[in-house]
Amino acid sequence: MSGFPVDVTPRRRLADASLAVVIGALVVTVAAFDPDTTAVDYALMALAAAALAFYQKAPRAVLAVTAASEAAYVLHAHPGPVAGLPVFAAMHTAARAGHRGTAAVGAGCSWWRTS
């Protein structure tokens, strides 16, 4: 498998957690401006963003969790395009880890949800 090696140093884990926090904050901030956003929507967004913190250990699982939770959020709330940010980040990291086929399937599912 051609991809980047797993780096589990505390500094790298902090960077992974920071990625999850920043993406989660962006998605939640945009959703906060929608008056129809419910607690379930916030929980789904938080789950998708939190999963990104583990992308180095299990990129395919992270892609599956983010895609499933964001799909449920999109089907429930019909948000804007920023809601797909966690899935795009997970697709990027899965492809970068060498799981390009899995990332391509995730891209196809993301495109289908937005059409």
Image (cartoon, grey):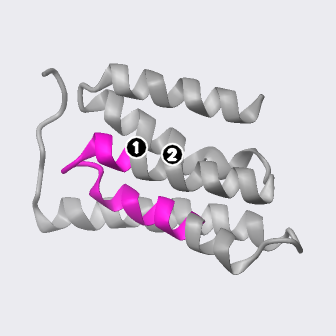
Category of crowding for the residue at label 2, using alpha-carbon neighbours closer than 10 angstroms: few (below 14), some (14–19), many (at least 20)? many
Disc 2 marks a residue whose amino acid type is: Ala
**Which circle marks residue 90 in the picture?**
none
* Magenta stretch: includes residue 83: no
In the rendered image, residue 56, in percent from the top left (x then y), is placed at 23, 48
Image quadrant containing the C terminus: top right
Q: Residue 99 sits in which quadrant?
A: top left
Check disc 1 and report its element: helix, strand or loop.
helix
Q: Residue at x 75, y 66 (%)?
A: 31
Image position of 6 (left or right of 91): left
Label 1: which residue?
63
Check disc 2 and report its element: helix, strand or loop.
helix
Q: Which residues are magenta?
A: 45-63
Disc 1 marks a residue whose amino acid type is: Leu
Label 2: which residue?
67
Disc 1 vs disc 2: Cβ atoms closer than 8 Å? Answer: yes
